[in-house]
Amino acid sequence: MAQVLEFRLPDLGEGLTEAEIVRWLVEVGDVVAVDQPVVEVETAKAMVDVPCPYAGVVTARFGEEGSELPVGAPLITVAVGAAASTGATEASDASAGGSGNVLVGYGTSEAPARRRRVRPTPAVPAAANGRSVAAEQVGEPDDGRRAQTAGRDASGAVATARVDESGATAAGRAGAPEAVVDGPVPVISPLVRRLARENGLDLKELTGSGPDGLILRADVEYALRAAAVQTRTAPVPAATPATAPATTPGGTRVPLKGVRGAVADKLSRSRTEIPDATCWVDADATELMRARAAMNATGAPKISLLALLARICTAALARFPELNSTVDMVAREIVRLDAVHLGFAAQTERGLVVPVVKDAHARDAEALSAEFARLTEAARTGTLTPAELTGGTFTLNNYGVFGVDGSTPIINHPEAAMLGVGRIVPKPWVHEGELAVRQVVQLSLTFDHRVCDGGTAGGFLRYVADCVEQPAVLLRTL
């Protein structure tokens, strides 16, 4: 007999709680193999192919292209086993248990051990103390049905729910109202309990998407978002003339989701948590531009201006390591980082993204140019992976490409600083005691005042400006 397994949208990492379906890669009735991509989704970080951990026949898809699904929501159902279809091979134990793979390219863990089959039991009455009695597991042969444990809390108590041959719970999936259990709620994390308590949410009304029905933070957040949407769409009773509010002017509402929503959340967190300060200086970039022109006249691969600025940043961070750090307020420690993973702001059609050049301190100008070009093209096409968009320790923001001279950048949380670079334009400048037209740029540094004082920040920025004005200063660090 075929067994229908439900595959839910997996945790995509980095705190992402939802994804938008871009394109389905399989149809209902298709035969799929273990770890075969079944859908292409877009998160706030990147485009991702989601692989299915089961081998069998697709029996249902959930969600249309363009719709958003929260992590833990049903994605597809797959019939596995000898009777799944005439075109599908019998699924092995590993196939039925899943491969453990979450995202393509992120590795595969061992399949979990198979659970002992249990006989489904009818609902049992509540005990005298008001708590439900857990169904007792037995080791008798399978009768065509399978039981699934719904969760286990700190006390070790277990609640069970029946699952029919289609893989749906007898109460919730079939459309019948699911009874609220008075026993232990399958929640382990105290943060999840607190989040529900602070928002007046009854955890007993939720169905967990974690292992064995464990209620995760994503389940609580999804329920809260659903409640908010229901509140916004509920009809509002007409107010009396005496209490009627003023008419709100018409306008267009743009949802904060995807990249725009992720940027909004991150920038708000930065402004809320980081006591930042900004200093800036004008610098004569004439010699830097001449040095770049001389490098590119040799016939070797071209060196980008961004690569030279990145090389200057890594040299400055070697002198002022306080700015390549992060703050752990729980431990009340400043964590100075050994490697420089340099992020750079890139504007795309999907919004602002910050790809990260890993180990930028170990790369020369030519290697930096090649990596910047590769990541910029990936950002443009929307093919950056989550790993290429996370893990930065310092950010370089070249907003001069927008034709502006200066800005006060917002730190890319949880980093400690960001260097902003304005446009390089001809301006009158006193050079060697005489007024001349030089290529001038404004540099600005926003830094976390917890990691250092103004003297350190000013020293960093002044060293960067000296390298821009006299690139030969970098020879000391080569």
Image (spheres, grey):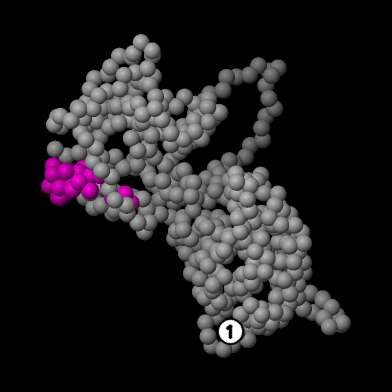
Classify 447 as above or below 269: below
Classify 73 as above or below 154: below
Side of 214 relative to 372 (left or right)? left
Whether 80 is among the magenta residues is yes
Residue 400 appears in the picture as rendered? no
Q: Nearer the viewer, residue 73 or 416?
A: 416
* Image location (x, y in percent) of residue 262: 54, 48
Q: Dot 1: few (<14), some (14–19), or many (≥20) neighbours within 10 Å?
A: some
Quarter of the view holding residue 155: top left
Q: Residue at x 67, y 35 (%)?
A: 249
Q: Element at badge 1? A: helix
- For the N terminus, give its image quadrant: top left
Side of 103 relative to 6 (left or right)? right
Side of 248 relative to 112 (left or right)? right
* Image location (x, y in percent) of residue 365: 57, 77
Residue 181 appears in the picture as rendered? yes
- For the C terminus, give its image quadrant: bottom right
Q: Which residues, given as a range, are shown in magenta?
A: 78-101
Residue at far bottom of view: 298
Question: Which residue is denoted by mark 1 in the rendering?
Answer: 296
Q: How many marks?
A: 1
